[in-house]
Image (cartoon, rainbow, N blue to C red):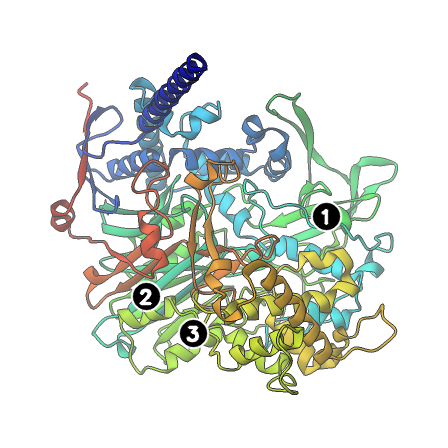
Amino acid sequence: MFTLFRWLLRIFGTLAVLSVLVGISVYFFLSRSLPDYSESFTLSGVQGQIEIVRNTHNVPHIFAEHETDVFFGLGFAHAQDRLWQMQMLRRTAQGRLSEMFGRRTLRTDELMRRLDLYGLARSSVAAQDSQTQAALQSYADGVNAWLRQSNDRARGRGAPEFFMFNAEMPLWQPADSLAILKLLSVQLNGQIAQEVLRARASLLVPNERLQDLMPDAPGSGVAALPDYAAMFPDVTPDYQLATHHDPLSPIRTPTMAGASNSFAATPERAASDGAILANDPHLELTAPSLMYLARLELDSGGVIGASIPGIPAILSGRSEALGWGITSSYMDDSDIFIEELNPDNTTQYRTPDGWADFETRGTIIRIKDEDPVTLTLRWSENGPVLSGGLFDLGAVTPPGHVASLGWTALEAEDTTMTAAMRLMRAQSIEDALAAGELFVAPSQNLMLATPDRVAMQTIGRMPRRSAEHETQGRMPAPGWRRENRWIGTLPYSANPRFLDPESGILGNTNNKILDRPFPLHVSHDWGDTQRIERFLHLMRTRNVHTRDSFIEAQLDTVSPAARLLLPLVAADLWFSGEAAPAGTRAHLRQRALRLMADWNGEMNEHLPEPLIYAAWMRELQTRLIRDELGPLAERFTHVDPVFIERVFRDTDGAGEWCNIVQSSVRETCTEIAITALDEALLRLTERYGDNVESWRWGDAHMATHTHSVLGEVPLLRHFVNIRQSTSGGDHTLMRGRTSGRDPEPFANVHGAVYRGVYDFADPESSVFILSTGQSGHPLSRHYDDLGDLWRRGEYIPMTLDPELARGGAVGITTIRPLAE
């Protein structure tokens, strides 16, 4: 017995030692890719010495004698910290994910190939001005210099993920940067999916109820939609369920398309003598964040702010002369066309002038551990043909037809990168507005400020549609009818512009910015109808503003939607009836209503009221629409306050939604509200216990910054994903968009990945923050160090003063030219 114990002890000890050795070895190999920020290099491809000065938070300040070397340094720094992220962005745009991940990503690769995103990027290189082409090449040289360092000096292949996925990392090309910029258009577009969803819903409900379900932004005229079934009689209602969201897919639902806040005050509305600008772009929360902080010393002066790894530009930031920020404009710059096939020759489609041949080309998608797939790519005069499995197009495409896509982002001479470069160098608002004319896609609202002026300009190409367009671009339309086809694009002068407002304040929360009739309407669907009300309230409560008041607005967590909906929905429920016995549903309901009666709508992470409100409204909307839409109701993942307001005010008969059509009795809205509240409380009790007062919104509203590849891998996900309790919600200025998907419907998955506030009265007091950290390496202390500050609503300073940057440096990378 003693001998057996001794041998077991020896075996256990040996296994323990081997485990430790394996762990040390794994750590050693993975940590080899952690860069030394104080290292010196002698490299080819540079003209003079480059200094990359890293501050306490690993923000690179890049100095060089030649401007092209500055972009070399930015490419080098991006590759040091975010090489895997750059690999993923490039492969996504190229349609080459399946080489690494197998059939899982085949649909994504198919979409990228059908859009020909990378081919369009290659064509666009020559369209850039000479200065931008030189910057793109120098940036690529910088990325490739680090790639060579990683390979030649055994630096852990550049990132830990490369050990787990055996995929080559080809040298970076200028077209790669343009492809990532085009990929942003895909990620920020919600109009394509919105068109399809509206068409599917129109097959199930009459037009007046469709206006309730997918309402226009308040204040706009309601355009009568055609009957989709009348346009395409062979299309029948499709009850297909929503597909699972893949973190590797760039396709976003309309509720998860890009969003942002940006606001500016003139010196007349500022407490000190200088304009103020604040910007916080809202994107999917990922680990690492899509954004990366940097400071560049250009020939025109220093610029500082947020970049995207793979793109050599500061997309939101400031110089000494100018501050700029961006918000998604929600411009309707894409249309789905239904193309009729020639029944005698399916290689042809109908045009206004008769049958025409598709332009075709073959492409091969290689799939890990499987045979490759060959696709035949087709283009009509309206755009690329998409398969029925993309965007649920099959559900709205009749037999004998295919769907094609018209989109300004599919421009082969796209000068958006040149626009971004010129914006960084702009010395005045006029310079910045002129640069915006070259911007093609994704369309944005560009907020601008100089020390004495502010402006906002919508940038991006706007399609020119006929006033007789059958669907006004709101649903797929017959592509063979001349009135539905685009007539090129509108001139830049047609894009909305706001200069030096009399009020002294400009702001955008993705809200409707103007009321122009179709076809100059910009959009029918906007990203916000609620946050703008809170913004206006905060701006009006002060005669003058400061940097701190703008920060307060960025971090505001009061929900105007909650303040609007609760008095409507619960109008007949407050303090009604006798006290119910403990342990009954009525008693639980009364406790919840008592809490909400005293609540001011603040979506604070420590309170139970936001959780009760969010669960109630979610259950209420589902009950209102489920019997009419069936499984399609799952596509409506987020509460639409305008819809619920219309129902409970019975606007144009919208109260009809409260009646369950499949029951023999006629239900009232009050009855549906009670049932929805009871069901919501039951679900919350099962999850969080019986003590309503101890529930916390933050326990459900965890910010989930997910690693796109390792985020779902057991064990590893606990090391690479970042989770934080957060305040805010779907309709607060500090927007924390909930997932809308079970089992974590209230998880915070989409929010401000970057916040910046620039005060031109004291530019050096400007502040910045990211949602994670600068590094994409999970073993780096800079992987999530900024995330803790972001969660608490804190910021970091960044300076344009070279001496201050060097004085506070924690590492200086020096790059010298290789002697010829």
Give whichever of discs 3 and 1 has the lower sequence position: 1
Q: Residues within 10 Å of mark 3 (few under 14, many from 20)?
A: many
- Residue 81 occupies quadrant: top left
Local secondary structure at mark 2: strand
Q: Is residue 711 left or right of residue 35?
A: right
Find residue 681 and report its horizontal and vertical position in percent: 61, 68
Find residue 116 and report its horizontal and vertical position in percent: 58, 37
Q: Is residue 574 left or right of residue 458?
A: right
Local secondary structure at mark 3: helix
Point 58% across, 82% down: residue: 567
Q: Can the viewer see residue 621 in this picture?
A: yes
Local secondary structure at mark 1: helix
- Residue 277's disc number: 2
Query: Residue farthest to the front?
Result: 1
Residue closest to the eye, 38 or 567? 567
- CA gap between label 2 and label 1 equals 41 Å
Give whichever of discs 2 and 3 has the lower sequence position: 2
Find residue 75 and report its horizontal and vertical position in percent: 32, 36
Q: Which amino acid lies under the numbered mark 2 shown in the image of this protein? A: Leu
- Residue 176 occupies quadrant: top left
Q: How many marks?
A: 3
Point 79% across, 77% down: residue: 667
Residue closest to the eye, 364 or 162? 162
- Residue 393's disc number: 1
Q: Residues within 10 Å of mark 1 (few under 14, many from 20)?
A: many
Q: Is residue 358 left or right of residue 267?
A: right
Q: Residues within 10 Å of mark 2 (few under 14, many from 20)?
A: many
Residue, disc 3: 535
- CA gap between label 3 and label 1 equals 37 Å
Q: Can the viewer see residue 214 in this picture?
A: no
Residue closest to the eye, 202 or 604? 604
- CA gap between label 2 and label 3 equals 14 Å
